[in-house]
């Protein structure tokens, strides 16, 4: 079976759907089925393995020797699957440092 449409996001609690063929009209109430999830890439699995404790975006970029945008791309993919959480925390490096708020990412605990 070939896909006929893609879910592009949500609006007002409902999915927004875009047909692959723009001349196609989707019937109201038409059933759409989700494809099985793809397995994690090696890089995504590496990020998941490092996130057993909370890490900031800068920490992850330093660990993997990449930019923060590169790290954010992989974190976004993991968050969309519900595998990690993010939490705003205050970090102070030294007594003289004023510190700053930053997002910290951590792997979700398996319950069950």
Image (tube, rainbow, N blue to C red):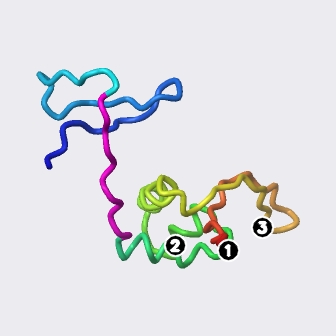
Q: Residue 91, how many percent across, how many down?
A: 77, 61
Q: Which span of residues is magenta-colored?
A: 30-40
CA separation in Å, label 2 and label 3: 25 Å
Residue 78: within the magenta? Answer: no
Disc 2 is placed on an element classified as helix
Q: Earlier in the sequence, mark 1 or mark 3?
A: 1
CA separation in Å, label 1 and label 3: 18 Å
Q: Residue 74, how many percent across, how many down?
A: 43, 61
Q: Nearer the viewer, mark 1 or mark 3?
A: 1
Q: Quadrant of residue 90?
A: bottom right
Residue 32 versus residue 111 in the image, above or below = above
Q: Quadrant of residue 93?
A: bottom right
Q: Which residue is mark 1?
A: 53
Q: Nearer the viewer, mark 2 or mark 3?
A: 2
Q: How many residues crowd mark 3 within 10 Å: few (<14), some (14–19), many (20+)?
A: few
Residue at horizontal 59%, vertical 72%? 51
Q: Which residue is mark 2?
A: 48
Q: Earlier in the sequence, mark 1 or mark 2?
A: 2
Residue at horizontal 21%, vertical 31%? 19
Q: Which residue is mark 3?
A: 93
Residue furthest to the right: 95
CA separation in Å, label 1 and label 2: 10 Å
Q: In the depicted view, which residue is nearer to us: 108 or 33? A: 33
Q: Earlier in the sequence, mark 2 or mark 3?
A: 2
Q: In the depicted view, which residue is nearer to us: 65 or 13? A: 13
Q: Is residue 71 left or right of residue 104?
A: left
Q: Residue 79, how many percent across, how many down?
A: 52, 56
Q: How many residues crowd mark 1 within 10 Å: few (<14), some (14–19), many (20+)?
A: few
Q: Is residue 25 left or right of residue 65?
A: left
Q: Is residue 88 left or right of residue 96?
A: left
């Amino acid at each position: 079976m070939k896909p006929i449409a893609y879910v592009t996001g949500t609006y007002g609690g409902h999915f927004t759907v875009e047909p692959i063929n723009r001349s196609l009209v989707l019937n109201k109430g038409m059933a759409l089925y989700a494809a099985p999830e793809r397995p994690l890439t090696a890089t995504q699995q590496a990020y998941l393995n490092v996130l057993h404790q909370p890490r900031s975006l800068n920490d992850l970029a330093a660990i993997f020797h990449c930019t923060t945008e590169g790290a954010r791309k992989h974190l976004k993919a993991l968050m969309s699957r519900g595998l990690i959480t993010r939490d705003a925390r205050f970090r102070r490096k030294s007594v003289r440092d004023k510190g700053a708020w930053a997002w910290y990412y951590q792997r979700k605990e398996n319950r069950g």
